[in-house]
Image (cartoon, grey):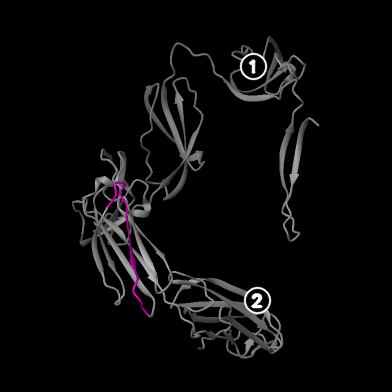
Amino acid sequence: SPGFHQLHMRFRDNAGRWSAVSSGSVTIYPPRTADIPQIVQYEYWFDGDYAQIQTVGVPPGESFSVNGLTLADLPEGLHQLSLRFKDDAGRWSAVTSGIVTIYPPRTEDIPQIVQYEYWFDGEYANCQTVVVAPGERFSVNSLPLSDLPEGLHRLSLRFRDDCGRYSAVISQNIYKVPQRPKEEVAIKAFRYWFDEETDEVETIWLSQPATSFVLFREIDSFRFQEGEHTIHFQFLDEKGEWSSASGVQFLSNSVLMTFPEISLSKSGVYPNEIITVHGKDFSPSGLARVTIQGPVTFDNLTLELAVSGKGEFSYSFETAPHSTLAWYQVNAVDVNSGREAPHRWMFTVPPTNTPVSYLSVTYPLNPLTVDREAHFAVEWRDKLVKGLGHSVSGARRSYAYRIELSADQGQSWQTMETMEGWGYVDSWVNFVYSYSISLPGTGYQFRVTDVKTGDSRVTPFITVEGESGSGNLKADLS
């Protein structure tokens, strides 16, 4: 039905659990008729005194602005105005309220400020009074703070005119900084960055600390778009403290120049793998000098390639046979501008059919002691050799390890967790699984299984005793 309502809503997941209830307010409006309602009257009152309501009729209209109200009988000071409107169907709008201030009539003589007083932290008993030359305005530029303790304080201030009237109190927080003894500290480094590029900060270390020095640094103006920019500086002293940042604005009227970039992609299957170099943002219709380095079985290349009118090029080369993981590094320079593209790497890995198992487990010492719970961890490491059954992408391969616990001397096993992910081929991976047991026993065992190969390691029986005390909960055994 039309009116103000409260909406409640909650959600249920596939486990049958309900979320917390969310609530909100909604308003249902009555159906609008073909005729748009017309405002025909409004009424207003002050300070919640509805008995003193004033009613004003207005020509019918879809909207109406109240430009003037009768305030002659309203006393000076702060008041609350309440207002509502009535349409041609006899319906009233919601009440709108606001604050109005009635000022005393101004005399021919403008009041003059002749005095002000101030105090700290609400202690008016310690108020300080200062007499000033009469004037319409006055600015407090400084206050004596020598007797004020260091730290955060609340300053209160008010003014008095030549008629003896005080202004309202103005208050704000101030912080008195601790006085540090003056000493000459040498600068040993500085750093700078542009605009809001705080992830591109460059730090420069001085060859010798100095109390003052002239900063001279060449900046490539082509890195900036045309317009206004800011360079920010910070300085590091011998005590290891950075100064506050200071900024200098400058105007760049240069045209933004793009920097060349290269990317690498690989296709084919070992031993017929192809690496393709893609270049972009080079000088249109210019030349790119490309250098390719690889394993000892690969003949390194340096060649100049033609760049298209769009500033792009591509070049493909065959990889060399090799028995282990091999890398290829590609560098490219724009011959026309002299700008160098960031170098790129590509790895290739030959397949192996019989991977060697490197899985090893570290387990706790016996016995573990229960106070409330016995906390211990099983750690294991493995070398990610490449073999059948592994998903491989470039120099990375997938792994998965299943952690199981037996509490009955290996008669039954419960899967506690499976850890999955990707790592680099021929590199070591390390894992740890922590568990807590609150019941004493002598038949606890952990089993870690390489899901990809089926290889597993089982810990000896772990004894958990029920004595008080902390006990030795973990040891590094290989």
Mark 1, other Cα within 10 Å: few <14 / some 14–19 / many ≥20: few
Q: Residues within 10 Å of mark 2 (few under 14, many from 20)?
A: few
Asked if marks 1 and 2 touch (Cβ < 8 Å), the reply is no
| Segment colored magenta | 307-322
Is 436 above or below relative to 103? below
Please name the residue that numbered disc 1 is placed on. Answer: 63
Q: Amino acid at mark 2?
A: Met
On whether residue 423 falls in the magenta region, the answer is no
Main secondary structure of the magenta stretch:
loop
Which of the 4 quarters of the picture holds residue 92?
top right
Q: Which label lies toward us, 1 or 2?
A: 2
Q: Indicate left or right for 314 with 359 as reference.
A: left
- Kind of residue at badge 1: Ser
Q: Which of the 4 image quarters holds residue 131? A: top left
Whole-percent x and y of residue 240? 32, 62
Tell me the residue at 49%/43% (across/down).
121
Q: Position of residue 377 (x, y in %)?
A: 58, 80
